[in-house]
Image (tube, helix red, strand yellow):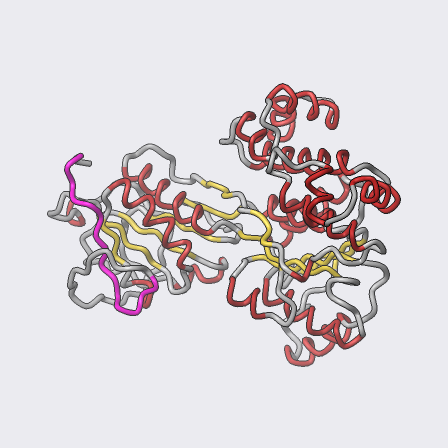
Amino acid sequence: MNANSASPTLSAHPSSPLPHIAVNPRPPMEPTSAALGTIPFKIPSGHRSASRQTKIWVSSQTAQPSFLQGIIRYAKKQSWQLTTDLLQSGNVSGSWLGHGVIKYLPVPTFDSQTPSSTDLPCVTASLSDQPTTGLRVQADNFAIGRQAAEHLINRNCRNFAWLPYAHDKTNQIRYMGFLSHLRDRGFSCRQLAPPLLDTSVDPCRERILWRQAMIQPLEGRTGLFASSDSLAIEVAELVGETGTRVPEDLAILGIGNQTAECESAPISLSSIDPNLEELGFQAAKLLDAALKSETNANSCIHVSPTGVEARDSTAISNLENQRVAQALVFISNHYPDPRLGVCSVAESLNISRRQLERDFRNEKGCTIREFIEHTRMNEASRLLSERPALTVSAIADQVGISAQGNFFRIFRKHFGLTPSAYREQQTS
């Protein structure tokens, strides 16, 4: 790229959710029917634009604004020109004179609905694990499952259930991550039936049977991990018919973290943020590498989730001592603060330190200091496993331990390994 290139411009349909930087008029698109498959990296001379600016087509009918923002963030660094007319049609015209394509597929079956006659380099981004080859950026669904398990454990759940929408590859990987972390912590998991067990039967009757099964009473406080926000919300509505209380009897966690859906639910829904903005950024970065012939034809990048956006559906409220429940929430929200300690927890609850320490030990079987340390080490181990780009010192800072020597000592006490050795063991 020329260092003096103009800043990125954006050609967008007026109804596109992507904010305008500049709008350039374009001729109508030519709809085509050929499927967009694995694309060779060589750009035919007939497709070269007269402009020096790299032109990228963002192709999707369902892209979320945060995903598009990630692409914009990378495009600004490279002075790319983005065209998003395809957000409405999903079609790439063979006559379009550009350099590459980024397409977003919410589920693999959408691939056949994204036709194209272009042979430009193309990156497919998705929250699902795509069975196809080619340039792909996907959510780390195993990490999503492990993160869900850790959140529900920290929310004082001791019984666990997994509810997929279907028995597809993506949900199997999420379940494997969920189950593996539960087993690491000494727990088991009940796998519930998905809403549609047999697509050959009447789907309406199948749904009714599923709903009847879902409203059976649960034993003990259970942490339920559902494969989508909408499915989690439906379960919250169903179990209310049995008198099951959310979150007192059942803590419910979804995936997607769509704010409007989660906040407007009858009980606001806790949800895992899959990090769509980073998904868009990495898709653009991988396409750039392909344009520069710096990657192979079957590269796949997995993006770690941002974390859990905790709301009312997983609140800690079933402890007999509500002050201890409030202390757990305070610690969960403030463990990255190096100043967090017994005194700050007691002050937040307007209770004496001695009284809180006695109540906490009676309820949890450990001291407040030990619980804070345990919470920090759990998060540190997750970051070491799932965020390879983060240095050990950066992870120590993120979990609230500013002195690296203390971090090494505490980590070795909990896991019997140095942080670097633990990371190597988990990623080998």
Residue at 68% across, 57% down: 225
Residue 166 occupies quadrant:
bottom right
Residue at 78% across, 52% down: 323
Residue 379 occupies quadrant:
top right
Residue at 40% across, 43% down: 282
Residue sitting nearer the eye, 392 or 406 = 406
Q: Is residue 176 visible?
A: no
Exactly how many numbered labels are in the figure?
Answer: 0
Outermost residue toward the left?
Answer: 50
Quarter occupied by the N terminus: top left
**Magenta span dominant secondary structure:** loop
How far across and how far down the image is residue 256, in percent? Answer: 54, 58
How far across and how far down the image is residue 280, in percent? Answer: 40, 49
Is residue 315 one of those drawn in magenta?
A: no
Quarter occupied by the C terminus: top right
How far across and how far down the image is residue 56, in percent? Answer: 26, 50
Q: Is residue 58 visible?
A: yes
The magenta segment is 3-17
